[in-house]
Amino acid sequence: MDSDPEQTGGIFWPELIRGTLVKRYKRFLADVQLDEKTVVTAHCPNSGSMKACCEPGSPVYLSYHDNPRRKLKYTWEIIDMGTSLVGVNTIIPNRLVKAAAQAGLIDQLTGYERIDAEVKVSDHSRLDLVLSDPIKGKCFVEIKNCSLVNQGHAQFPDAVTVRGLKHINELMTLKKQGHRCMMFYLIQRMDATVFSPADHIDPAYGKQLRLAVDAGVEIAVFDVVLTTESIFLGNKVPHIL
């Protein structure tokens, strides 16, 4: 990425290359047609099922990385699903939410002296952000990328997630210890009007999320402002549990 997210509150892409998605396969690979004679294999930085955002024939945008250590020089960043551009790269939400928090753009996460990323909270688990302040104490934040949207209804997860369930349980434990805790869902697209857990895909996740909220774990849901030049935090999206 071309800019320092901590200074701008957002992320600017390098020059992106437009192509057409041929297929996504083996989770982390995607074949993309760049022109009549050129098909490249790009890295797909998304381990989810990518329901509703991996339709063959859709316009996609790739970044190029001339790094001799990289086997795949292209990375799939964005797909155009007609109703919205959709961010594919699941590394982006953590970077973007941290940058927006540092820039004071998230009301729920202001007033903390320090923000740390990827903090170990147990022998087998890390959480995405920990905000610390000598007066306010600590706030633990787990960030989830949401790309599944159907007729304006955003849902998470798009596949059964044992890891996601573990993160909810970690937050519940920390909440019992007296800390502030938050699940932050970043919808990497601009066509969602409401968010809820995807009970039809992973009912156990939805059930545990509701228990966590009842126990005091907070929820924040935002969409993004996404173009082929940049991605910034967008608007709060209401949630229904």
Image (tube, helix red, strand yellow):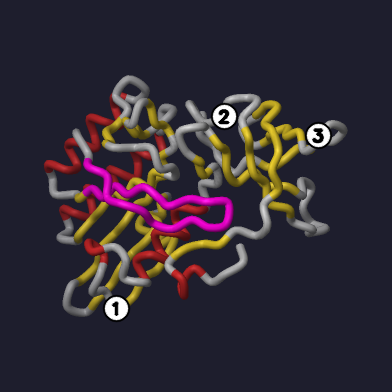
Distance in Å between CA atoms under marks 2 and 1: 40 Å
On the image, which quarter does residue 99 sit in?
bottom left
Q: Amino acid at mark 2?
A: Cys
Left or right, 58 with respect to 74, comes to: left
User: Which dot, 2 or 1, sits closer to the camera?
Assistant: 2
Helix or strand or loop: what does disc 2 sit on?
loop
> Toward the viewer: 210 or 120?
210
Specify whether residue 3 is painted magenta: no
Which disc is residue 39 wearing?
3
Range of residues picked out in magenta: 219-238
Distance in Å between CA atoms under marks 3 and 2: 17 Å
Q: Badge 2 is on which residue? A: 54
How far from the left and from the top, in percent, is residue 198?
Answer: 32, 28
Q: Badge 1 is on which residue? A: 113
How far from the left and from the top, in percent, is residue 73?
Answer: 77, 49
Identify the image quadrant of the C terminus. Answer: top left
> Toward the viewer: 107 or 203?
107
> Nearer the N terminus, badge 3 or badge 2?
3
User: Which dot, 3 or 1, sits closer to the camera?
Assistant: 3
